[in-house]
Image (tube, rainbow, N blue to C red):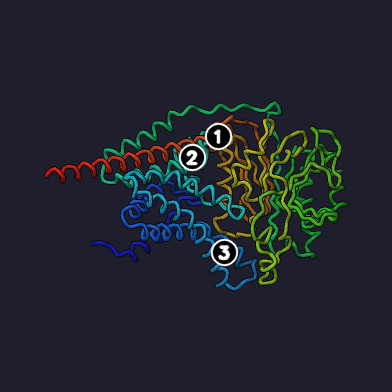
Amino acid sequence: MKLSATWLSLLLFLAGLTSSLAFAPFNHFWLVFLLFPALFYTCFNTNLKQAAKYAFSFSLGWFLSGIGWVFVSLDNFGGMPFIVSAAMILALAAYLAIYFTAAISLSHYLQKFSQYAIYTLPAFWCLFEWLRSLVLTGFPWLSIGYSQLNSPLSVMVPYVGEIGLTFSIILISVISAKHYSKLQIILPMLVSIVLISALLPNQTATTSDKNSVKLTLVQGNILQENRWDPEFLWPVMEAYQDLSRPYYGDSDIIIWPEAAIPAVEPIAQDYLLNLDKATGYNNTALITGIINYQQYSNEFFNSLIVLGNQNYRSGKGHYQYGHDNRYNKHHLLPIGEFIPFEQWLRGISPLFDLPFSSFNRGEYIQADLKANGFNVMAAICYEIVFPQQIKANLKPDTDFILTVSNDAWFGESHGPHQHLEIAQMRALEFGIPVVRVTNTGITAIIDELGQIQAQSPQFEEHILQHRLTLNRVDTLYLKLGNLPIIIISALMLLAIFIHAIREKHMLKITTERLKVDNGNI
């Protein structure tokens, strides 16, 4: 029985919905090797127009289920009717679906020039993933490589990164779709991939001269609706201080989440100076998120600042307003931290008038934070999703990556789990520990192999204390970034281009011979 195009589109949409189960917190990584070959087989055995429809149906389902958690923030805190929030999520999913629809359509179009054009898909897929990370400041969430964090393929990550996993998954799926009936091709291919992965040399970790750092991560569990309410200003600030005070002198570094202090930095000077003095006197550093307002330039920054000891056990604070031991967020979140087309959107909905929704960007490359003699590379919220930004900011003497966030926006959805999964991938790619501190969870400490060493429960006020060994692995991905995948993609495209020219040339010769033969009859 042959299904109609409408039924196939519906089935592919449902398959797309199912594909999000390959990611955290579900982690059914094997699903992609069933769903994506089925998608590609369907798309490459129909005409171009229908292939685009099938690709869009699958991708729409994929992103609706995969990033549906954004709806929680829109519906709970955006101040818009349910139907408007739902429409915005549908529009976002449709926008993201366009990228992979374009990749499949472009590869399909090239079939008219070469029978092997389907093998261009891994290259085009990665190209459009790159575009997805750039356009409108970028939103490369739910890239397919993250699904393999807990699979045997994860051993490839230190060599080719998450983008290399994405390339490999698409290539495996293409081969499976092209030769679905030929087990003599597919099985040896899968065995070869497993063997190659198993034979990759182990990455050797080196331990810093500092050996380890004792961390105290403070998860305040402050309700989102209270964070910027003036009535809760001092209760929130006192709560963080009270939670941290028992660990002064017992920790090298205490860390608070993104914008933990619900007052702009110039207004909170007395509070900050007292914290600086207390932590410094007890030979502790404290890193906290705060909003900085520079009155002279009328600029707002989403910042991390260091209080207490800058140098190891110096016994004194070093903070003063405007000091350069800080990080200003570079990669701003559309709507949440800046409003595209602000002159038209302001006032339409409370969503576009959220507190501090008009930030300024920090520099792309910034110095490490100096905290009690340790060098800390910072990334705020979804900046951890951008591996090239992380790579550009890592220094040879960086001790660990710190990413802070406030995932209270997303409630009990799977968004925070995906966020943690992404942080694990960065640790594995760059061979360096990642420390993640959030308001409501999931706060976690991740080692240089991407393994979680300690984590907090969600939606609880919690102190996570852990001594982190400062190991680093000099990964190939840290050295070369995406270059190997770029070269492989370019060679594949070149090979298929050359083959297409040869096919055209051979067709021309054959046609001319037929004309000559017909003329001789």
Alpha-carbon distance for marks 1 and 3?
34 Å
Let me know if residue 251 appears in the view: no
Q: Are marks 3 and 2 in contact (CB under 8 Å)?
A: no
The quadrant of the rendering that contains the C terminus is top left
Q: Secondary structure at mark 2?
A: helix
Residue bearing mark 1: 477
Disc 3 residue crowd, few under 14, some 14–19, many 20+, Cα 10 Å: many
The quadrant of the rendering that contains the N terminus is bottom left
Alpha-carbon distance for marks 3 and 2?
30 Å
Above-or-below relation of 454 to 65: above
Disc 2 residue crowd, few under 14, some 14–19, many 20+, Cα 10 Å: many
Which three-letter amino acid code belongs to the residue tagged 2? Answer: Gly
Which three-letter amino acid code belongs to the residue tagged 1? Answer: Tyr
Q: Are marks 2 and 1 in contact (CB under 8 Å)?
A: yes
| Label annotation for residue 164 | 2
Q: Secondary structure at mark 3?
A: helix
| Label annotation for residue 71 | 3
User: Which of the two discs, 1 and 3, sits closer to the camera?
Assistant: 1
| Label annotation for residue 81 | none
Disc 2 or 1, which lies upstream in sequence? 2
Give residue 199's quadrant in the image: top left
Disc 3 or 2, which lies upstream in sequence? 3
Disc 1 residue crowd, few under 14, some 14–19, many 20+, Cα 10 Å: many
Alpha-carbon distance for marks 2 and 1?
10 Å
Disc 1 or 3, which lies upstream in sequence? 3
Which three-letter amino acid code belongs to the residue tagged 3? Answer: Phe
Report x, y in % for residue 213.
Answer: 70, 34
Give residue 449's quadrant in the image: top right
Report x, y in % for residue 489.
Answer: 45, 39
Q: Residue at x 58, y 31 (%)?
A: 479
